[in-house]
Each structure stands twice: as C-alpha cells, then as structure tokens.
Amino acid sequence: MRITKRTNIAIRVLMFCGTNPGRMVTKTEIAERCNTSESHLAQVINKLAQLGYLHTQRGRHGGVTLGREMSQITVGEVFRAIEANTPVAECFADIDNTCPLIDACRLRLALVDAVEAFYDHLDQITLEALVCNNEALFTLFSSPPCLKRA
C-alpha cells in the first residue's frame, strides 16, 4: 500500500507540532523543516484543522499548534481521515472503474481485508510514540542557528 503525498505531509506536520509544544509554529517553518511547498502545506493544515488535529490562529502572532494531546492522535485515524477518498485499486473507485472483473474478482475482498489490517496496525501507533524520546526527530526539527551578518 502506498500513502499519498498529502497524508505524508499531514503526519510530518503533526510530528513537527509535537516537537514544538507550547508555541505556535508557522507554515514557513514547517515547510522548511518538512521539505514541502507552502501551497501543499496550506491545504493539509486546513484539513487537519477541520478534523480537530490542529488549532490555527491567524495574524501577526498566528500559526498552528496541536489541537489534541499527542496520546489522543493515532496514525491510523489520521491516515483514514486524509486518505478517505483515495481508492486502493481501480475497483474501489466509484468513478472511472473500468475493470471487467468486478463481479468475479476475489482480489477485491482480499484487498479490503489487507487495508483494514494496515489501518488496524496504525491505530496502535500514537503521535506521542512517534515523537517522544525521538532525539533524532528533535534534531531534524530544531531551528537553525542564528546567522551573523557581515
């Protein structure tokens, strides 16, 4: 199974916010540290805020913070929410399904079971488990040192 870029970015955003508790982080900071464009990021942040995973604040001192405790956010829940309209295979698509095997194919049933097992496993992993005591992550997401101007 392959996750979409949007879901990948969503998890990165949540992890970044998790490594920066107690402060508003900016879209620019997240884009720089998570190696993504601000336009993709804006869409993902908006969706995560709608779903209650993030709290957003506009204005000069605005930014984003987690909308829930890290222990209350599971990877499976986030994946399901973001991937909700992404079919695993053509036969799962409501539109554009041209598979001639649809009425006889047993693979679809196997895929349904496999996808559910995938999400069930990810339901056991919290954002807290991804972030806490992950020094390498904190190092990657830490702010760059101030640069001296000549």
Image (cartoon, grey):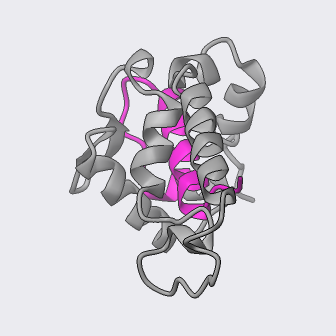
Q: Residue at x 67, y 11 (%)?
A: 133
Q: Report if residue 61 is visible in the image.
A: no
Q: Residue 55: image x %, image y %? A: 26, 40
The magenta span reads: 1-30
Query: Does 76 lie within the magenta span?
Result: no
For the residue pair 78 and 84, the one nearer the viewer reads as: 84
Q: Is residue 131 visible?
A: yes
Q: Foreground residue, 106 or 3?
A: 106
Q: Main secondary structure of the magenta part?
A: helix
Of 104 and 5, the residue lying toward us: 104
Q: In the figure, is residue 114 to the left or right of 84?
A: right
Q: Position of residue 100 (x, y in %)?
A: 63, 84
Residue at image point 65% right, 42% down: 114
From the viewer's perspective, is residue 111 above or below residue 20? Answer: below
Relative to 51, is 68 above or below? above
Q: Quadrant of the C terminus?
A: bottom right
Magenta stretch contains residue 9:
yes
Residue at 55%, 71% in the rendered image: 103
